[in-house]
Amino acid sequence: MKSFKEFLSDTQQSNPVATSEPKKWSATKSEIISYWRNLRPDLPVLMRSIPYTHRGSTYGEDGIRITGSPKFIGSVLARVKEILNYEGTETKLSVAYRQTASPSKALEGDTKTSYVFYVNSKQRGDKNPNTP
């Protein structure tokens, strides 16, 4: 019996319309764990700041999203305090911390309270573009 991946691969090879999008990269769990374990703990946080003129979604930009309980979010934030250095004269932090709700979970009777924290760095700019 073919696996789903094999079936999909065979289908895409016989159907040129289905091959229009290249397969996106993905690591296996063992590759991720190995990569994570081999990272040096003294590496600085290298966050690219979003340009001042950027408009629209920041989904593909450098940033952190942490979900779960306030205790979990706080414990992770304690480990990445270095990101606070991006709040300064050249860049600023864009942050959000709020309670979340899952309508689909609520329909299933799951009323657990959850939270989400986001942080990105943005370049500061001149609020008046006509100023020299």
Image: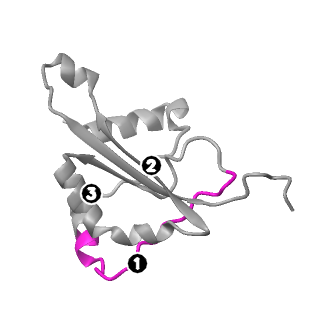
Q: Can residue 2 be seen from the camera position used here?
A: no
Quadrant in the rendering for residue 39: bottom left
Residue 60 position within the rendered picture, expressed as x and y whole percent measured from the top left: 51, 50
Residue 82 position within the rendered picture, expressed as x and y whole percent measured from the top left: 38, 72
Q: Out of 117 and 103, give the one closest to the viewer.
A: 117
At label 1, the amino acid type is Pro
Q: Reply above or below: 84 against 117.
A: below
At label 2, the amino acid type is Lys
Precedes in sequence: disc 1 or disc 2: 2
Q: Is residue 6 magenta?
A: no
Q: Which numbered disc, 1 or 3, marks the residue closer to the eye?
A: 1
Identify the element where label 1 is drawn. loop
**Identity of the residue drawn at 27% across and 21% down:** 103
Q: Reply above or below: 22 against 16.
A: below
Residue 102 position within the rendered picture, expressed as x and y whole percent measured from the top left: 26, 27
Q: Which residue is mark 1?
A: 44
Q: Which residue is mark 2?
A: 24
| Alpha carbons under labels 2 and 3: distance apart | 13 Å
Quadrant in the rendering for residue 27: bottom left
Left or right: where 91 falls relative to 77: right
**Identity of the residue drawn at 20% across and 61% down:** 75
**Identity of the residue drawn at 55% across and 30% down:** 17
Q: Can residue 60 be seen from the camera position used here?
A: yes
Dominant SS of magenta comes to loop
| Alpha carbons under labels 1 and 3: distance apart | 25 Å
Specify the label residue 28 is tagged with.
Answer: 3
Residue 113 position within the rendered picture, expressed as x and y whole percent measured from the top left: 18, 34
Report the label total: 3
Pointer 1: residues within 10 angstroms few (<14), some, or many (20+)?
few
Judged from this view, the residue extending furthest toward the top is 107
Precedes in sequence: disc 1 or disc 3: 3
